[in-house]
């Protein structure tokens, strides 16, 4: 799925990384606990989350993710967006809630991702 | 195999916002040095969890990363409250983190088990009231 498709499906706004919308991603994870995201390496390129602090960006960087989607109309502060921009991530914001956002992406073919190392 | 490059960081304990900066920097250094993405991810995630722990549980500390040809060592040292029962702390789900930390996305009790899972060896030395030092090694 192209990141641009995520943008359309979730009627989202682009907060940074506009030039990378044609990048393809194959799996996502929806999570508000960063240590859960860090727990297992999965080939997950998209992080859907309701949290807006810098640790969300660093967690995505640590896991080599490509895109963060902030749900529930949350607007991350400018320094968080700048951090993500610096790291080359695409950041989207949508009014959808976590469950709906994940449901729409999953239903349209974005998988959950396989655990690679145990 | 004795050649070694050292990176040293002081970890600010008062600042949750900057927690993890050292790990992001290490990630960049290792990438510049040409390590594989898997090795880089293992080192940087283990260090990141340790760095966050030092900020939320121990009021900061220091991090040293020693890069050898065949392995990467991470040494995290703090003068925090120490861990009284290491075996318990290593269990998944065990956490003493306060609610405000949980609302920031941490405090699930996954950090230490994650560090063990991502590294080839891990040793915790801790004395209550004195501090904690964690040694981790990732073989290249
Ligand atoms: N450097 C440290 N100094 C003192 N206590 C620590 C330190 N690191 C960990 N602990 C103790 O060990 C417990 C378990 O740590 P662990 O990293 O596994 O979980 P957590 O930090 O509470 O939550 P998470 O890592 O999932 O965000 C902590 O709750 C804390 O009580
Ligand atoms: Mg922790």
Image (cartoon, rainbow, N blue to C red):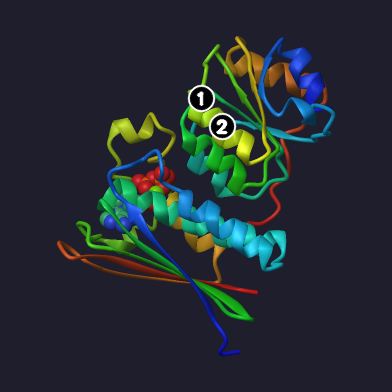
* In this view, B12 is above or below B123: above
Name the residue that disc number 1 marks. Answer: A78
Q: Which residue is pictured at 69% across the width and 13% down the height?
A: A12
Q: Is residue B93 visible?
A: no
* In this view, B23 is above or below A50: below
Name the residue that disc number 2 marks. Answer: A82
Where residue B100 sits: x, y (%)? Answer: 31, 31
**Count of number-bearing discs:** 2
| Element type at mark 1 | helix
> Left or right: where does residue B9 sit relative to residue A58?
left
Q: Which residue is pictured at 77% across the width and 32% down the height?
A: A111
Determine if the C-beta at disc 2 is less than 8 A from ligand 1.
no
Question: Viewer-proximal residue, B14 or A56?
Answer: B14
Question: Viewer-proximal residue, B113 or B102?
Answer: B102
Where residue B10 sits: x, y (%)? Answer: 35, 59
| Element type at mark 2 | helix
Question: Marks 2 and 1, how far apart in space?
Answer: 6 Å
Count neighbours of disc 1 (C-alpha within 10 A) and say few if under 14, some if 14 to 19, many if 20 or more: few
Where residue A81 sits: x, y (%)? Answer: 56, 28
Count neighbours of disc 2 (C-alpha within 10 A) and say few if under 14, some if 14 to 19, many if 20 or more: some
Q: Chain of mark 2?
A: A
Determine if the C-beta at disc 1 is less than 8 A from ligand 1.
no
Quarter in which the C terminus of chain A is drawn: bottom right
Q: Is residue A15 visible?
A: yes
Where residue A7 sits: x, y (%)? Answer: 75, 17
Question: Viewer-proximal residue, B75 or B3?
Answer: B3
Q: Residue furthest left?
A: B129
Q: Quadrant of residue A89?
A: top right
Labels 2 and 1 within one chain: yes
Quarter in which the N terminus of chain A is drawn: top right
> Left or right: where does residue B67 sit relative to residue B21?
right
* In this view, A37 is above or below B40: above
């Amino acid at each position: 799925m192209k990141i641009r498709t995520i943008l359309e499906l979730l009627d989202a706004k682009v907060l940074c990384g506009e030039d990378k919308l044609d990048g393809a991603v194959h799996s996502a994870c929806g999570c508000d606990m960063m240590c859960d995201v860090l727990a297992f390496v999965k080939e997950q390129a998209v992080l859907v989350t309701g949290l807006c602090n810098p640790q969300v960006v660093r967690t995505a960087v640590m896991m080599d993710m490509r895109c963060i989607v902030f749900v529930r109309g949350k607007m991350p502060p400018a320094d968080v967006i700048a951090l993500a921009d610096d790291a080359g991530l695409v950041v989207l914001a949508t009014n959808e809630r976590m469950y709906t956002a994940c449901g729409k992406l999953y239903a349209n073919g974005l998988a959950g991702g396989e655990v690679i190392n145990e | 195999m004795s050649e070694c490059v050292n990176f040293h960081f002081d970890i600010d304990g008062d600042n949750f916002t900057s927690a993890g900066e050292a790990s992001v920097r290490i990630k960049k250094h290792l990438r510049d040095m040409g390590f594989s993405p898997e090795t880089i991810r293992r080192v940087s995630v283990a260090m990141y969890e340790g760095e966050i722990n030092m900020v939320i549980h121990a009021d900061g500390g220091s991090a040293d990363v020693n890069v050898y040809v065949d392995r990467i060592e991470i040494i995290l040292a703090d003068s925090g409250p120490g861990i009284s029962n290491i075996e318990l702390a290593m269990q998944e789900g065990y956490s003493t983190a306060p609610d405000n930390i949980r609302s920031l996305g941490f405090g699930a009790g996954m950090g230490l088990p994650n560090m063990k899972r991502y590294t080839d060896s891990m040793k915790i030395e801790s004395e209550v009231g004195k501090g904690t030092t964690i040694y981790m090694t990732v073989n290249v």
